[in-house]
Amino acid sequence: MRPILSLTAMEKLLRKYGALRVSDEAKRALAEILEDHAEQISDKAIKIAKHAKRKTIKAGDIKLAVK
C-alpha cells in the first residue's frame, strides 16, 4: 500500500528533532509506523463517534482514543 504521509514530511520531523541525515529507508519506516498508529487511533475514534450517534469525528474523540 502506498503511504499517505510523504517522505519529505518524515525527513522534516526527524530533522526537527535533531537528525542530521536521514535515509530513505528510515523515512519509509517512520511513515509506516505513524500510519499504523494513526489507523488504530482512527478506528477507536470512529467507534467513539458512532457510540455517540455522530458521523463527525471530533478532537475529543481522537484524544479519548489515545488514552
Image: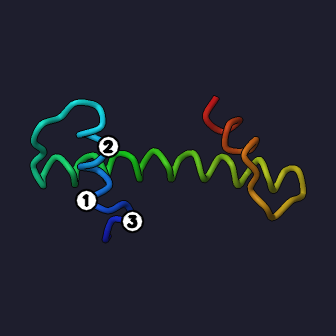
Give the percent coordinates (x, y) of residue 59: 72, 46
Which image quadrant is residue 66 in?
top right
Which mark is first along the chain, 2 or 3? 3
Please give left or right for residue 49 compared with residue 66 in the image: right
Which image quadrant is residue 17 in?
top left
Mark 2: give few (<14), some (14-19) or many (20+) Cα within 10 Å: some
Give the percent coordinates (x, y) of residue 24: 12, 55
Q: What residue is rendered at 60% in x and 52% in y?
A: 42
Q: Are marks 1 and 3 in contact (CB under 8 Å)?
A: no
**Residue sitting farthest toward the bottom:** 2
Amino acid, disc 1? Leu
Which mark is first along the chain, 1 or 2? 1
Give the percent coordinates (x, y) of residue 43: 61, 52
Residue denoted by label 3: 4
58 relative to 60, above or below: below
Give the percent coordinates (x, y) of residue 9: 32, 55
Please give left or right for residue 49 compared with residue 41 in the image: right
Q: Real-space Cα distance between discs 1 and 3?
A: 9 Å
Residue denoted by label 1: 7
* Quarter in which the C terminus is drawn: top right
Q: Are marks 3 and 2 in contact (CB under 8 Å)?
A: no
**Residue 13: assigned label:** 2
